[in-house]
Image (cartoon, rainbow, N blue to C red):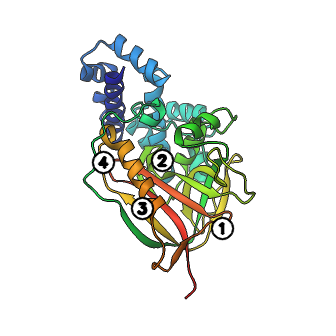
Amino acid sequence: MYEWQKQIQSIVDEIDRCIGSQDDEALTLRALSGRLGYSEFYTTRKFREISGMPLRDYLRGRRLAFALKEVRDSEKSLLEIALDYGFSSHEAFTRAFKGAYGVTPSEYRKDPKPVILRTKINPFDRYFLGLGEIGMVKSTDDVKIYFITIPAHKFLYVENWESNGYWDFWQKQNLIPGQDYETVCGLLDSIKGKLDDDGGSEANCGSGQIMAYRNDPEGRLCDWGIPRTECWGVRLPADYQGAVPPQMRLTDVPESEYIVFEHGPFDYEQENRTVEEKIERAMAGFDYSGTGYCLDTTPGRLMYFYYDPKQYFKYIRPVFRTKG
């Protein structure tokens, strides 16, 4: 199964690459299964077994997700967008678009409210698989620690004060109607203007979606005895005036100073646990004396967590200046 997770991940990556480059010939089932060296039947069966959906449905959903962002962000004609993303006509595109999002492309272009996109699946995500680190190879990179000032912005999010970690967070969220992983991540992926969006569509990196921890205003203790809640959301400009999905909260975050604990790129399979433990030790053992700062535990303050093995593993924690 482990090898198939890697194989399916390669197919998922190839699908997004081909859609982005509009390489329709490489997006056929024959071409995709040929990459794996298996029959079309066996490939579709394994894809469904691992991802939980038919390959054709996933492919159609990702095409529509790419097309929606073109409708939202470009000035191309709707017919041109339809043809670019594999639809035979304006009418076929409109039917598929409305069937997926409840509005026509023209209606959405006029009023781009959040809709649920088919986000890129990540079957090799070790958090969702519940697997630990394969090896225990220590990173040669040190944890960088520095202070920064983050301008005022807004944070749009869902929260769960009973969860403990990313995997547990989504297990609990998936039990709440309308706040499950697919719905929340799909809605957030459709929102324009996310401050951390680098153009990708993976839920845990690339599309501007991040985990955060909020100092609980009510002092409720999470499972590990700390008064804070776990959140999943996106940072937005301070002047964001877009619609807010009913299951989410939007909060203003004033300009503030933070301390960053950052590890550089690392091997996803071999070093994940090592890097996590290294960061946690650095945070637990950091001596604030002489820095002019203290950790800010004021109710409502947010700590951000950024996770992308290709770039970094970092926590951004709020601080305040000490007197004198």
Q: Residue at x 61, y 48 (%)?
A: 114
Compare residues 93 and 23 and report the one nearer the observer: 23
For mark 4, give the secondary structure. Answer: loop
Identify residue for label 3. 261
Identify residue for label 4. 266
State which quadrant residue 147 falls in.
bottom left
User: What is the residue that sits farthest to the bottom in this orientation?
Assistant: 324
Residue 74 percent coordinates (x, y): 45, 53
Gap between marks 2 and 3 measured at Cα: 33 Å
Q: In the image, which is nearer the foreground, mark 2 or mark 3?
A: 3
Number of other residues with Cα within 10 Å of mark 2, as a class: few under 14, some 14 to 19, many 20 or more: some
Q: In the image, which is nearer the foreground, mark 1 or mark 2?
A: 1
Compare residues 305 and 70 and report the one nearer the observer: 305
Image-based side of 8 in relation to 52, left or right: left
Residue 176 percent coordinates (x, y): 69, 35
Identify residue for label 1. 298
Tell me which amino acid carries mark 3: Phe
Gap between marks 4 and 1 measured at Cα: 33 Å
Image-based side of 39 in relation to 207, left or right: left
Identify residue for label 2. 69
Q: Where residue 231 is drawn, which disc sits there?
A: none
Q: How many labels sit on residues?
A: 4
For mark 2, give the secondary structure. Answer: helix
